Each structure stands twice: as C-alpha cells, then as structure tokens.
C-alpha cells in the first residue's frame, strides 16, 4: 500500500462536504423559486412525446459535469415537460402535494440514506415508523392495537393485504405448495365493488387468483357497494364450491369518492370468516376532521386498512400506510430470513424487522417526512385544511346544481366533484360525451387548471378534485370561470 | 364567497416560499454537517430497542411546532439510534451510499413531487427514465433494444420479472383464470442456485407458485450455479409432468458475490423456452469498468435483468432498474387501464405509461437522482470508484491469505471478502463459529466499522463489503487492524 491514494483528491464527481453545502444551498434556493413560481406554468404539460428524449445526449458523459449545467437542463428541458402536481391549479386524479416539511424530510432521509430492512440497520427509522403510524392511528380515530408499516403505494399495500388474506386460508398451504397443479384446491374468490380501484384487480392477477377471482359487486345510486348483493354473491359462490377469502371495501372511491357501507360489509366478513381490507387510500385522511370521521365507520372491524399520506396529507410521494390487526398473518405471508440477515436483537414486538411485512427487502426512511409534516402542521391545521377542501367541493357542487347547463353526476361527499355540461335539450349521450370531452381538453390546454375525467353509468364525467395544499377560494372561483368559459367556447 | 379566506394568512404549519427557502438552507447546512461528521458516530447504532419510541410523545401535537424543535429531536433522539450507511466504516451487507448529486436529485424530485404513472402526468420524468436507463445500458455494455423501468427494490424487479415469466406461459391463461381449483394446470417450477437471494423465493410465494415451485440448484466450489445440475433438474421435472417456466441466474450473489455461468444457463433456457432473469442487483454496476464487464457475459441473452443503482452506483435508496427484451410480456402481466386513466397521447413506444409495467400505480421521479449522479460523476469516475472498491477487496483478501490465523472462505471476485479467523490447531466447527461470531460482535461494538456475516457450507463467515462511496485505502488498513485486534482480544 502507498500513501498516495490516501493523500489524493476526492474522486471526480464526488463533492466534499463544503462543496455539497454550497450545492445544497443552491438547490434549496432553486426549489424555493420553483414553489414560488409554480402557478406561472401550464399545469398539464403542453410538451409533445419525445421533447425530453430528443433534447438530451444519446450517450452518457464520460467526464464530470458541473451542477450548473444540470440545473440549466432541468429548467430548459424538464420544466416545460413537467405536469405540475404542486400547482394549486392541479385538480386531476387525487391531489398529491409535497409540503415544505415533507420536502425537507425527503432531503434528510436521502442524507441519512438508511435501509430500514432490519431494526438494527435503522433503529431510528423503524421506531419512528411505529410511533408516527400510531400517531396517525389516533388522528383518524382507530382503536389500538393496530400494527402499521409504510409502503410505496396503495397498490402495494392492497397487494400485501390480499396476500395476507390468502395466507389466512392456512389449510390451503399456498405459501408452501403454490396453487398450480393442485386438484385439492378449490377455486378462490374475493369481492370489491364496481367502483373499486384497479389495483384491487391487479393484486389478484399478481397473486395468481386471476381476474376471474375478483367478483365485482354492484353499487347503489350513490356508487356504494350494495351489501345485499355482496351477501348474495358470497352465498352463490359457497354453494358452487368456491372459497371466498376477502372483501375490499372502499372509503373514498376513485371516481366519485363514495364510501362503502363498511359496518354491513364487516358483519358479512365476520360471519363468513373473510379478510376485510378497507381501501381508504384517499378517504382515510378525511377522518382527521372530527365531522368527517364517519368515512372510517366500521373500519375498526377491518383486518387491514390502507391510507395514503401522499394523497391528502401533504407528504411527498411515496408514502402509503398499511395497518393490520393481524400482523402475524401478514408476517407469515412474507417472512423469509436468510442467514446473512439473521439478528439477535430483542423480540419481534420490540425490534421488528419491517422487511418481513411485504415484498420489498430494501426500505427507505419514509416515516421521517410524515412525522415532520404532522409535527410542523399539528393535527388542528391538517384537519382544517382537509375541511376546507371539502368546503371547496361543496361550493362547486352547489354552483353546478344551480347552473342551467351543468349538472352533477354523483354526490360529492368529500373533496371531489363529478359533473358535466348538459345544455337544455341536448340529450344524445354520444353528443354529450363528446361535448364534455372537448370541455376538458379546452380547460387543460388553457394551462391554468388540470382536470381529469371518469365514466359514470356510461356518461363521460368531468372530475374536479380539490386537495392540493395550496388551493384557496380563488381557485374554486377560477375553475367555475373556466368551466363557464369552456362551455361557451365549445358548446 | 367572501374575500376573507383569500386575503388570509397561509395555513398554520404550511410555509410560504420564503420561509421554506430559509428552512431549506438550514436543512442543507444540517445535511452537510452530517456528511462531514458521519465518521464520528458509531457505524452500527448502539441503541437498545425502545429508545426512540420511549423518547417521543405518545400522541401527535395539536399545534404547529417549529423546525428547530424537530431538528433538535433528530439530533438528540434519531442520530444515536441511526446505523450510518453513509459512513465509510459501513462494510456490512452491500453498500448503499447517497452521493451529493444523488441527495440533491432527491430534493428536486420531492419539490416537483410528480407521479409518473402516466406519460401525461409526468412527461419529463417518464422520458428521463427512458434516456437515463439507455445511458446505463450503454455503460454496462448491453445491446439494444432493451426496455427499462425503475422500481423501488430488486425484490420488486425480480417479482415483476417472474410475473412476466408466468405470463409468458400464455396457454395457461393465469392472468384471467388464476391457478386455484384448475385441474387443467400442471405444477410449475422455476430455478435458482442455492446462493440466490431470498427475494427470488419470496417472489414465488407472492405469485402463488409457492416455495415448492422454486427448485434450488447446487453450486460449484466457487459458489456458482452448476449448469449440469440445472439441466438435470429441468429434465427430471419435465419427465414428471411439471412445467418449468423460468431460471434466475445471479451476477454477484449476496453471500460471496459469485457470478453464475450465464451463457450456459442461457443456452438451457433457449432450448427449453424458459424465461431467463439475471439478478445483477449488486454485480451489474461492476460492468461499467471495462475489465469487469465479464460479470454480465451472457446477460445479453436474458429476458430480463435487474441492476440496483442504489447499491453500487451512489444513488440514494430506492432505485432498482429492471430491463427487459420483452416489454410486451411485462406489460401484459400488469396492464389494467380503468376509464379515469385512459389517455390519448402517442403510442406506447413514444409515450409509455410506466404504471403498466409493475404493481405500483404511483411512481415517484426516481430517474432524476440517477441521471444527476451519472452526469456529475461521468462514466470514467464511476468506473474508477468501482475499480478501487474491487482493489480494496483484493488487498484485504491477499492480507487474509497471508495471515496465519485467518483464512478466506470464498473467492472475492468483486468488492466483498468472506473470511474467518482460524487459529492453527483450532478445528472444532462449533468453536470456530463461536469465535468468529465474537469477533464480529467485537468489531461492531467498537463503532469504527460495521461488518456482517453469512454461512458458507455451514461455516460462519465474516463478510467485509466494500462499495461505500467514501471509502479509502485507510479504511482497508483500518478493518485489517480491527480484525487483528479482535482476534487478539477474544481469540
């Protein structure tokens, strides 16, 4: 060994801590400018496919490039091709806003860069996750004990919940023996409403239950699962020799934010020994406001519940909370501990290894940003912001119902309004659908707002979603003007 | 509507852009100090279970708390309970270092906070992902065309690859009909070596293939899959009416970094129509150094390949690249497009919707940090850093082989060394295992280094992994001293 390497300069491309400090302050300023100016950009990017791809070199650089060159490319190439989820004009899908404490939490998590696979590899991250999820449990009014883990998305959380539901059918020994080529196995079935999220269906595909394994249950006139139809479906399947194993109830469906009648569904699950998973990815946050706590009525009887702080709790994506009353079953569905990951610390309750509760071995420190959001806002302010978003939706819904050429297509119990233009005398379904599609395109092309659409009973619906952290009353008035202007232009 | 709300102050807990700017600069400084001082902390946390849980309030705060209070808690409560993956003394598992450009990339991604589920919801993130993964493809010397997506972890990437492999058995119609209660289905089997990662087994459990669906293939004296045994296993299974569908070859196993003979395995897969997935989560990055490109020999014939930039490419966790030569099969395994996510932009090739290639609908902008790392380092510097890590391992392995009371337990082809203390005359296996376990505990308790262990042919092995961005020759000398000191103390 020589001393040369030790005395040598830092490696090219790496920064020493002082160079990093300078760069990090620049990026801090850059992001502050971005958040200050975000309303100036078109919300839905006007870029055409290939604009970023075509603007970048076809091959990677051989030598180091300065941060300035990278930031210039971000400004000139990436910003024009960015759809600005941070803009208060973003009213599509469900909101996902990164608040200031959330962004700072992500920076700190990246600086620590721990892998919270085992308690010992990240004690602080592991315990902070438990404490923060217990705080959130109290905030939404769910009784303890409730074991929680943070996953990337609700798609993963629902997949894990249904994997646990499958594992709970322990007599079938699916973990050990699989399902293929086993004449001893019955067909299996789980249930969700016609309005349940696509991830519920995708989870069944991944788990080998198949699309046919999901039976869709009709909804009532308010887009809520019909528990009478659910009971009937379970009885039919049992009579046909099929094994029911789970029901997914939704608290806040994607199209209309309808809330399934969870108490009635829970009663059926208890009667038939089915795993009840409550998909409250969007709606669960509403329960922080006491007057909206009803959205989780009955969820205290669920086997598992998912709530996404990255949707309506101002935490940067990704952050999805999966709670379960049966952690031992979730763990049985996933735990494999090879020799190189064996540890000796404490019991599983004192020092859980969170890799044992899902598919991903590697786990970043997602709890930090959520903990910082809760602390910096406090529960009162979070409840108040959610309350205001629901008030914005009520204001818009009232306006729609009083305008002669617009109509509501669904109740708006939370922060989303489904509506359409329906000029008097214009009743042809195809013409109405085309008109409303043109209105959506017109609004989105104008740049100030981005709204999305859905279909309700075959009708094209304009879907206006509040929930962005930075939305104010002026944005409610703004979307009304945009709707009015668009129907006048294209109607 | 009144003007009151519009004119009112920002919501409590939220920060206006100037308050955010001030806070972000503070956090920039805080993280710079952390990275400067990281070697001062014990690498493996000395905390006991409950220290963080017990130090935080049992309930969330009702009112806003200042950033200062949060940073104080991080310093006083979280830092002492943190295992410092950023420390150059971290030599456990596989390294995962967040470089400066990587941390800055995470901050920027959190500020944009886009969801790259659809091209239109994040054109820049979607196209940057494609461009960056094509750069990385060139860097590791794989031929085009190769479609890439970024997932959270290799566990997910391997799960998705095996889901595609199952889907490729299209005559079985598993996506539609599932596997349970179908007497028409054969038993199914996939193959990986005894040394393959636990995530390969977990994927089969999730997919409903079951643990019995994975057949483990023995390894040779250098811990590489034996292709003769693989051929024999496939023949036996086919003869027994079992349907083989995939092989997972590993380029850089977790215990010893052995590299399976991919060309011979690829030939068998081609002959039998099996999906070949190459797990190069750790080893793939080595191919950036021309003299190490052999680790991916044969991977150009694979159906899918996983490489984790968050392991050996200085990109903060999480960032796992899944490439496939058969994107249409991966897409068929996962794509479900509900009405509210239908779009009209371009073709799938021009404007892909990356949610269609895995379980997670929500996708954060993971490409930005990787792109910034590649640009700020340049390919030469990345190759050089990887080369040096391998030289550190060679240096340590040479030292071990010349010390009379230590021995190597496996070849060290890349950046990891498996060794043990073996004092002359001490040959009882149980005594040797206990001695080496005490050495590991001694080293880790001293705080300067964190090493992990594995078992090789029943023997407890001390596992020293280089690969941390900030490691230098002095750390190689340091771990030699620590090993020497520990055997003298506890031997």
Image (tube, coloured by chain):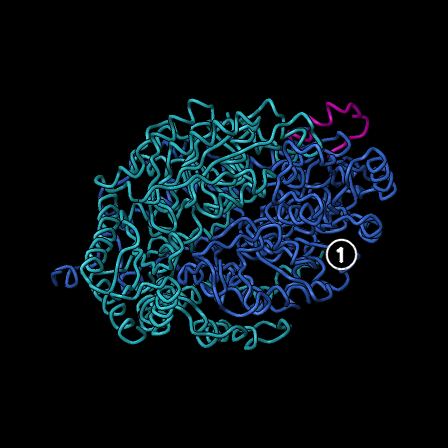
Chain colours: A blue, B cyan
State whether residue B275 is above or below residue B408: above
Is residue B274 rendered to the left or right of residue A472?
left
Quarter of image, res B100:
bottom left
In the foreground, A411 or B255:
B255
Q: Is residue A65 above or below residue A346?
A: above
Q: Nearer the viewer, residue B252 or A297?
A: B252
The residue tagged with tag 1: helix, strand or loop?
Answer: helix
The residue stretch that appears in magenta: A420-438
Q: Identify the residue under disc 1.
A: A299
Q: Position of residue B177 (x, y in %)?
A: 68, 29
- Quadrant position of the N terminus of chain A in the picture: bottom left
Quarter of the picture holding the C terminus of chain A: top right
Q: Position of residue A61 (x, y in %)?
A: 26, 41
- Image height of B165 relative to A173, above or below: above
**Looking at the rendering, which quadrant does residue A207 occupy?**
top right
Q: Is residue A421 magenta?
A: yes
Left/right of residue B177 with respect to residue A35 in the rendered view: right
**Residue found 62% across the figure and 60% down from its top:** A148
Residue A161's spot in the image, x, y percent? 66, 49
């Amino acid at each position: 060994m020589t001393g040369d390497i030790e005395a040598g300069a830092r490696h090219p491309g790496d920064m020493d801590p002082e160079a990093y400090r300078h760069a990090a302050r620049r990026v801090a300023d850059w992001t502050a400018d971005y958040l200050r100016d975000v309303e100036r950009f078109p919300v839905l990017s006007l870029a055409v496919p290939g604009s970023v791809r075509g603007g970048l070199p076809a091959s990677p650089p051989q030598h180091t490039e300065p941060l300035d060159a990278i930031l210039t490319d971000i400004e000139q190439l990436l910003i024009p091709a960015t759809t600005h989820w941070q803009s208060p004009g973003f009213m599509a899908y469900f909101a996902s806003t990164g608040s200031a404490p959330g962004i700072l939490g992500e920076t700190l998590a990246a600086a620590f860069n721990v892998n919270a696979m085992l308690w010992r590899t990240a004690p602080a991250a592991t315990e902070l996750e438990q404490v923060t999820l217990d705080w959130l449990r109290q905030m939404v009014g769910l009784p303890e004990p409730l074991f929680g883990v943070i996953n990337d998305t609700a798609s993963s959380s629902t997949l894990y919940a249904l994997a646990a539901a499958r594992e709970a059918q322990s007599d079938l020994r699916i973990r050990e023996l699989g399902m293929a080529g086993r004449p001893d196995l019955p067909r299996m079935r789980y249930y969700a409403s016609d309005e349940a999220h696509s991830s519920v269906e995708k989870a069944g595909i991944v788990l080998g239950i198949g699309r046919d394994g999901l039976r869709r249950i009709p909804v009532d006139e308010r887009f809520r699962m019909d528990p009478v139809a659910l009971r009937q479906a379970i009885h039919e399947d049992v009579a046909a020799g099929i094994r029911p194993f789970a029901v997914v109830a939704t608290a806040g469906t994607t199209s209309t934010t309808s809330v399934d009648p969870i108490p009635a569904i829970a009663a059926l699950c208890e009667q038939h020994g089915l795993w009840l998973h409550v998909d409250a990815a969007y709606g669960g946050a509403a329960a922080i406001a006491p007057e909206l706590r009803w959205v989780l009525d009955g969820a205290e009887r669920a086997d598992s519940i998912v709530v996404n702080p990255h949707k309506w709790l101002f935490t940067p994506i990704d952050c999805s909370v999966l709670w379960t009353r049966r952690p031992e079953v979730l763990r049985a569905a996933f735990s494999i501990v090879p020799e190189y990951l064996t540890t000796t610390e404490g019991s599983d309750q004192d020092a859980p290894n969170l890799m044992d509760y899902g598919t991903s071995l590697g786990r970043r420190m997602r709890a930090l940003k959520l903990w910082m959001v809760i602390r910096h806002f406090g529960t009162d302010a979070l409840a108040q912001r959610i309350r205001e978003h629901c008030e914005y939706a009520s204001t818009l819904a009232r306006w729609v119902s009083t305008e002669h050429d617009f109509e509501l297509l669904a109740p708006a119990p939370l922060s989303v309004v489904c509506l359409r233009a329906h000029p008097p005398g214009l009743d042809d379904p195809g013409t109405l659908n085309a008109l409303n599609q043109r209105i959506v395109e017109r609004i989105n092309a104008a740049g100030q707002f981005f709204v999305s659409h859905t279909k309700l009973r075959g009708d094209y619906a304009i879907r206006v979603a509040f929930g962005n952290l930075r939305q104010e009353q002026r944005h409610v008035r703004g979307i009304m003007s945009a709707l009015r202007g668009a129907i006048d232009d294209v109607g």
